[in-house]
Image (cartoon, rainbow, N blue to C red):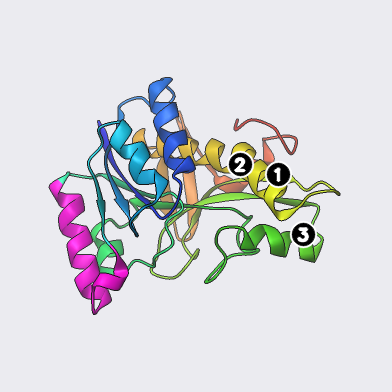
Amino acid sequence: MLRIGVMVSGGGTNLQAILDRIDDGTLKNCEVVTVVASREGVYALERAKKRGIPAVVISRKSFDTIEEYDSVLIAHMKKFNVGLVVLAGFLSLLGEDFVKAWKNAIINIHPSLIPSFCGKGFYGIKPHQKALEYGVKVTGATVHFVEPEYDSGPIILQKAVEVHQDDTPETLQKRVMEQGEWVILSEAIRLFSQGRLSLNGRKVLISEGNNTITNEEKSDRCAGLRGDIC
């Protein structure tokens, strides 16, 4: 059983998507064992409460140093024997100690096709505003392993989402979330739980039976902007 710790900063829609995929059997042998929020009052905490999942607020602002913050996070995740940490709309930067403690076992979902519209300050509605301002025809979502810098880790999966001419940042955000984030976040967790992810430098390798393909090759096999993960 893969024990998952989910870290959140807002409403928890990606947390809910993970729970839904556990419920429908897509994520077999997976369990969310704890939820950590970066601030009080977020609806993700209510989602956890409704499911009976232990949840706690651990705020970066409560600690003088990143090392102290990391130490408390590490202790909490170890208490629940967490095997995979999922950043599901989590806005605080993790320190080197925490990232090392779960090396190649922390994944993040970002609402753009990295390396576009990412990095410090690109969260919430901002990536979608910038995508529309730039005039891109395609945006999307990215799941990547986490390193101590924002949105800098090796890419696991990406999914393209079409930009419509009449889009607002809000309509684009909703489409990217529904067609991109909810799909590939659960898929990345599934692949991790099956031991099918490995790293060769910055390239994430995805094993399929006796074969291993790169994430770029996997993307090439998926046709269409709205095609399912293949």
Q: How far apart are marks 2 and 1 (CA)?
A: 7 Å
Screen quadrant of the C terminus: top right
Work out whether residue 165 or residue 71 is closer to the camera in this orientation and state it.
165
Q: Are marks 2 and 1 in contact (CB under 8 Å)?
A: yes
Type of amino acid under label 1: Val
Secondary structure of the residue carrying numbered label 1: strand
Type of amino acid under label 3: Leu
Vertical placement of 226 versus 24: above or below? below
Label whose residue precedes the other's in the sequence (2 or 1): 1
**On the image, numbered disc 3 is attached to which residue?**
132
Residue 78, percent across and down? 16, 51
Task: Residue at 39% x, 22% y: name it.
Answer: 23
**On the image, numbered disc 2 is attached to which residue?**
180
User: Crowdedness of circle 2 by 10 Å Cα count: few (<14), some, many (20+)?
Assistant: many
User: Crowdedness of circle 3 by 10 Å Cα count: few (<14), some, many (20+)?
Assistant: some
> Is residue 19 in the magenta section?
no
Task: Residue at 25% x, 32% y: name it.
Answer: 52
Label whose residue precedes the other's in the sequence (1 or 3): 3
Secondary structure of the residue carrying numbered label 2: helix
Vertical placement of 224 versus 90: above or below? above
Q: Picture quarter containing residue 147?
A: bottom left
Q: Can residue 203 be seen in this view?
A: yes
**On the image, numbered disc 1 is attached to which residue?**
161
Screen quadrant of the N terminus: top left
Looking at the rendering, the stretch of residues picked out in magenta corresponds to 59-79
Q: Nearer the viewer, mark 3 or mark 2?
A: 3
